[in-house]
Image: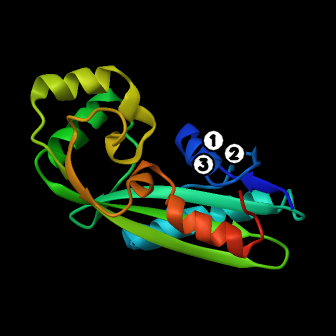
């Protein structure tokens, strides 16, 4: 059975390539607007479900994997930045503090459905204004929830608890277990 990743994220594609022998990429065009009353975990799960369902409707004979990562600070969801200034504000807000990262995932086939959300905790180093400006100017934070990628620069994160790949955008161990249940092994 064919596996389809419902995401344009190069990071998710790379992580999935470690655990799935072959797969295709078909980015979802699902609505990513969410109700402000949802918890970060619920939001990540809902978005992953929407992405998987939208692509599954086009490929009902495949197994489709949808995923979405949500960064939360103080119970509030921090989305992707609107621009460099927004990224700088978010990075300054997270500097020296702890926040949560949730990656929701949803696997769909004609016979099976599995979904969940994995939580990690991240503590930032204290980031200086010059570093924040330089990082924002690089453009790297502009397509990432919370305005950063743990893999982008070792100076950002002081420590984390939970899976590294979950923070990057796809909980590798969890997805590997689920793919085996769907009969898809590397």
Tags 3 and 2 in contact by the CB under 8 Å rule? Answer: no
Question: Which residue lies under the disc numbered 3?
Answer: 18
Which residue is at a point 73% across and 50% down the rendered structure image?
Answer: 21
Question: Which residue lies under the disc numbered 1?
Answer: 8
Q: How many marks?
A: 3
Would you identify the image quadrant in which residue 149 lies? top left
Extreme residue toward the right, this view? 61
N-term-proximal mark, 3 vs 2? 3
Q: CA distance from mark 3 to mark 2?
A: 19 Å
Q: Is residue 121 visible?
A: yes
In the rendered image, residue 141, in percent from the top left (x then y), is placed at: 36, 34
In the rendered image, residue 178, in percent from the top left (x then y), is placed at: 64, 71
Q: CA distance from mark 1 to mark 3?
A: 17 Å
In the rendered image, residue 7, in percent from the top left (x then y), is placed at: 64, 48
Q: Secondary structure at mark 2?
A: loop
Would you identify the image quadrant in which residue 31 lies? bottom right
Question: Which residue lies under the disc numbered 2?
Answer: 27
Q: Secondary structure at mark 1?
A: loop
Which residue is at a point 33% across and 40% down the rendered structure image?
Answer: 148
- The mark closer to the camera, 1 or 3, is 3
Q: Look at the picture and state if 4 lies above or below 10.
A: below
N-term-proximal mark, 1 vs 3? 1
Q: Is residue 18 left or right of residue 126?
A: right
Q: Look at the picture and state if 164 lies above or below 137.
A: below
Disc 1: CA contacts within 10 A as few (<14), some (14-19) or many (>=20): few
Tags 1 and 2 in contact by the CB under 8 Å rule? Answer: yes
Which residue is at a point 77% across and 79% down the rendered structure image?
Answer: 112
Q: Quadrant of the C terminus?
A: bottom right
Disc 2: CA contacts within 10 A as few (<14), some (14-19) or many (>=20): some
């Amino acid at each position: 059975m064919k596996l389809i990743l419902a995401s344009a994220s190069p990071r998710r594609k790379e992580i999935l390539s470690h655990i799935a022998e072959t797969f295709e990429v078909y980015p979802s065009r699902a609505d990513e607007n969410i109700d402000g009353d949802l918890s970060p975990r619920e939001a990540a799960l809902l978005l992953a479900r929407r992405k998987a369902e939208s692509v599954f409707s086009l490929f009902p004979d495949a197994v489709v994997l949808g995923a979405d990562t949500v960064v939360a600070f103080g119970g509030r969801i921090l989305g992707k930045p609107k621009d460099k200034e927004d990224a700088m504000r978010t990075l300054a807000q997270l500097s020296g503090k702890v926040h949560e990262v949730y990656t929701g995932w949803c696997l769909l086939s004609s016979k099976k459905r599995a979904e969940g959300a994995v939580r990690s905790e991240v503590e930032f180093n204290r980031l200086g204004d010059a570093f924040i400006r330089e990082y924002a100017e690089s453009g790297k934070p502009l397509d990432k929830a919370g305005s950063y990628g743990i893999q982008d620069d070792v100076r950002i994160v002081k420590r984390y608890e939970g899976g590294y790949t979950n923070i990057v955008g796809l909980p590798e161990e969890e997805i590997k277990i689920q793919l085996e249940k769907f009969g898809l092994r590397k």
